[in-house]
Structure formats: C-alpha cells, structure tokens
Image (tube, grey):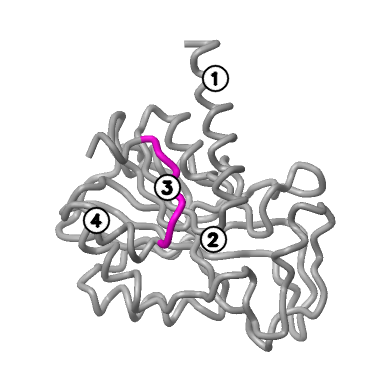
Amino acid sequence: MDKWLNQIIQGDCLEVMRELPDKSVDMIFTDPPYKLTGGGKGNSLLRKPELENCAFTTTGEVFSNPTPEFSDWIPLLYRVLKENSYVFIMSNDRNVRDIWQECEKTGLIFCELLVMNKGAGVPSSYFFKSAEFILMFRKGGYKKLEVFGQKTVFNVNMPIGDNKVHPTEKPIELIIPIIKACSKTGDIIFDPFSGSGSTAVAALNTGRFFIGIEKEPKYCDIARKRVEQAQAQQSLFG
C-alpha cells in the first residue's frame, strides 16, 4: 500500500480502484460528480479563467468527462473498505435516494443522514436550497466513534470568489470533524473523486494518511499543490 499513500493519483477512479487491494482503506469521504437535474445551467457561474472549461452544460454534465453511474463505483468502494468501517458520500437532494439504494445493494448499512448548512440559499422553483447532504454508511458491524457528541448538522463557510478553486469545492472544516470522529491517527482516508483535494488536506491535518484519485488533470494539479502546502505547514510547525 505504500506506493498509494499520500498520493493524488491522476486517472479514472474505476480503473485505479480495481488496482487497490481488498479491505485496504479505513474510511472513505467523497463528493462524487452527478448530473444536474433539468439539464443543468446554460452558462458557467465560474469567474476564474482556469475554471471556465468546466462550465455547466445543457447535457447536465458539470465536468468535461462523462459522469459515472453510481452502480459503477459504489461496489468498488465496498470492496476496498475495511470491515467495521465508515463511508461518507455527499449528495444533493435529488440523488440521495439513488445513492442510498445503490449502497444498500452492495451490503453497506445506513447509519446517518448528515446535513451541510451552507448558509446562503440557491434560488429554486420551491424553497431556496441552502443545504447539501452526507450519507453515512458502514461496512460490517458497528464501531464506536472516536469523538462523541458531534451533531448531524454542520454549519460551514463555503469557499467563494478567489478562494474557490473548484466548482463543487467543499470546505476542509466540514471534513475534519468527520475524520476525527470515525477514524484514528495513522488510518488511511480514501477519496476516489478528489477534486481540489479537500479530503486529502483534512486527512493530513488530522494525522491520517490519504489516497486520492482525480480524473481532471487541472484539478489533480490543484489538489497536489494544496497537499504540498499542507505538508509544508506541518513541517514548519511540527
């Protein structure tokens, strides 16, 4: 496993995950891509020039590569996850049911539905959307959490403006308490859809190892730079 540790691997997660050994990671936290309901948005909302190539499209695709089906990668998550361990999958409201059903098909056991409160609401035909969801499942038997008393709603400050380096970037402050609660120092945290590397940085900042996979080369580069910065900070203060 050493060759995989603390690496952001550029490639197709479906191919890379097949190379990972069975029951080799201690926890999974990922924010997978999914098509936007209703065909997405015609124009990109992103202002940074280096992000403009991943504009929201009329096909519903957010990124340039086709979105894999949940049934393609969730069974692979199950295979690489150790027994009595936890997996966290982020979702919008439209995809919660499909992800939930696919997870249960593989044998994962539902634990909690967590909420990320983003604060500001995104306009909708109904109620303005101010939350995303995190499905928590376990493989095998119950394992007591390392941190007791964490609430199911996480109030976070979303990356905006020049601080935002990925169209669906999630704040590190969301991921750190989940990692602390559901893994131990020295464990391996896995993210097959690394994006800008938030999970990897959160793992480093909590004394864990990480394995990340990212298909888009430019985001792989961004994630690697963020990891290097986190490692430099640790060296500076450690």
Marks 3/4: CA distance? 12 Å
Q: Mark 4 or mark 2: which is in front?
A: 4
Q: Position of residue 53 (x, y in %)?
A: 73, 63
Q: Quadrant of the N terminus?
A: top left
Sequence-wise first label, 2 or 3: 3
Q: Kindly identify the amino acid type of the residue bearing the numbered disc 3.
A: Ile
Mark 1 residue crowding within 10 angstroms, few (<14) / some (14–19) / many (20+): few
| SS label for mark 2 | strand
Which residue does the numbered mark 2 point to in the structure image? 115
Q: Is residue 118 left or right of residue 201?
A: right
Marks 1/3: CA distance? 20 Å
Instruction: Report the residue at 62% width, 77% height from top.
Output: 61
| SS label for mark 4 | helix
| Residue 115 position (above or below residue 60) | above
Q: Mark 4 or mark 1: which is in front?
A: 4
Marks 2/3: CA distance? 29 Å
Sequence-wise first label, 2 or 1: 2
Q: Which residues are magenta?
A: 6-12
Q: Mark 2 or mark 1: which is in front?
A: 1
Q: Kindly identify the amino acid type of the residue bearing the numbered disc 1.
A: Ala
Q: Kindly identify the amino acid type of the residue bearing the numbered disc 4.
A: Glu
